Amino acid sequence: MWGRETEEFLRQSDDYADQYRTVHRVMQRYNIAEDDHFDELERLVSAVSEFFSRVMALLWVDFRGVAMAMENL
């Protein structure tokens, strides 16, 4: 999921995902070219970000209504 990371960080991320991926557990990397893992924390807490929406989808929570309401504040 990180775009400004080192090759080693990405390799470790892939190894982690490969280790814990199962038929019932989705593991995927979402890359954002301009961000590293520190920047991603900012996106994760923003209900209007794609990263937030993807995480909520993995948790089976639909926050689209919340995101739309927050955009109108």
Image (cartoon, helix red, strand yellow):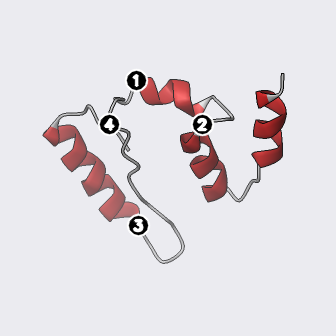
Residue 59: x, y in percent?
Answer: 66, 55
> Closest to the observer: 59 or 51?
51
Categorize mark 1 by other alpha carbons within 10 Å: few (<14), some (14-19), many (20+): few
Residue at (31%, 63%) from the top-left corner? 18
The answer to which quarter of the image holds residue 65 is: top right
> Closest to the observer: 6 or 35?
35
Assign a secondary structure to mark 1. Answer: loop
Nearest-to-viewer mark from 1 and 4: 4
Nearest-to-viewer mark from 3 and 1: 1
**Contact, mark 2 vs mark 4 (Cβ under 8 Å):** no
Question: Gap in Å between the C-alphas at discs 3 and 1?
Answer: 24 Å
Instruction: Indicate the amino acid at tag 4.
Output: Ala
Assign a secondary structure to mark 2. Answer: loop
Instruction: Indicate the amino acid at tag 1.
Output: Phe
Residue at (26%, 31%) from the top-left corner? 4
Does label 1 or label 4 sit earlier along the sequence?
4
Instruction: Indicate the amino acid at tag 2.
Output: Ser
Question: Gap in Å between the C-alphas at discs 2 and 4?
Answer: 15 Å
Residue at (69%, 34%) from the top-left corner? 47
Q: Which mark is residue 33?
A: 4
Does label 4 or label 3 sit earlier along the sequence?
3
**Contact, mark 3 vs mark 1 (Cβ under 8 Å):** no
Query: Badge 3 is on which residue?
Result: 21
Query: Badge 2 is on which residue?
Result: 49
> Closest to the observer: 22 or 4?
4
Does label 2 or label 1 sit earlier along the sequence?
1
Using the image, determine if residue 38 lies above or below residue 68.
above
